[in-house]
Image: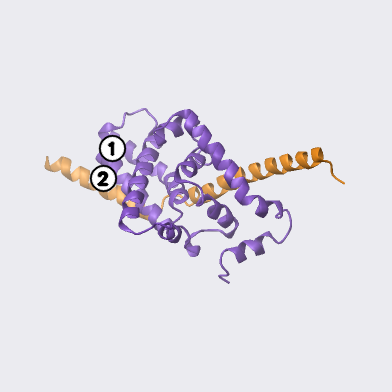
Chain colours: A purple, B orange
Amino acid sequence: MGDVRTIRDELLAAVPSLRAFAISLCGHVDQADDLVQETLYRALAHIDSFQPGTNMPAWLFTILRNNFRSDYRKRRREVEDSDGKYTENLMTHPEQEGKVEFQELRAALKMLPADQREALVLVGASGFSYEEAAQICDCAVGTIKSRVNRARVRLAELLSVEYAGQFGPDHKTRAVLSAGGRS
Amino acid sequence: MQTDAMTRKNSIRLGRDIQSKIGLQLRAMYDDVVKEGVPDRFSELLSKLDERQNKDKDAG
């Protein structure tokens, strides 16, 4: 009983960061929450394969990441998506993209290849070490490092115009305009 | 008038500024979601799973 309680508490404690990771991956809150739910189901179904005392968050992130990858591949096969339209639709529901101040960053993030995006988020936002991120993405540490670097360079390219001109007062106005003229 | 070296220096500094701004914004965006905490959907889900597990135990 005590064990069950502990595991449940650990799962609950991981939910907020799992959601943040999922939203960064797929850019869509509802889809992200489904992904987190599926992750929790799978984690409980395979709880025996988790070694107590090891890194629970890294284990959960691995499940979520693999889940996202296989869902995404499946959907890509199901939906004709040669020009990326479906993916784009998934990632640009303006009402679900959250705060205006992050819209440019979200838009830039979605232009990164998936492997660079997940590496950057794991290291740059979730706070995992390169080693942990490599474990989560099932690749070499050097691969993670180079993905993070490429992601940073690419983001800087994508955002340099926005950010360079931004140290002025009209940033918010332009952000709203670039969000597709919702107002 | 700017020399090439000055231009280069400026663009390096701009690159650094942009990098640190991207880093900060990325974390801010992420933390924004983390701060939302645990939506009811998930605490309810885990409570239900707990109950089911307990029932299974009683039955078995």
Q: Residue at x 42, y 45 (%)?
A: A18
At numbered mark 2, what does the secondary structure look like: helix, strand or loop? helix
* Mark linked to residue A38: none
Farthest-out residue, right: B1
Question: Is residue A10 visible in this depiction of the protein?
Answer: no
Residue A83, image x, y percentages = 43, 58
Residue B50, image x, y percentages = 26, 45
Kindly identify the amino acid type of the residue bearing the numbered disc 1: Val
Q: Are marks 1 and 2 on the same chain?
A: no
What residue is disc 2 on?
B50
Name which quarter of the figure residue A81 lies in: bottom left
Residue A166, image x, y percentages = 70, 55
Farthest-out residue, bottom: A183
| Residue placed most toward the observer, A54 or A142 | A142
Q: How many marks?
A: 2
| Quarter of the figure with the C terminus of chain A | bottom right
| Residue placed most toward the observer, B14 or B22 | B14
What residue is disc 1 on?
A4
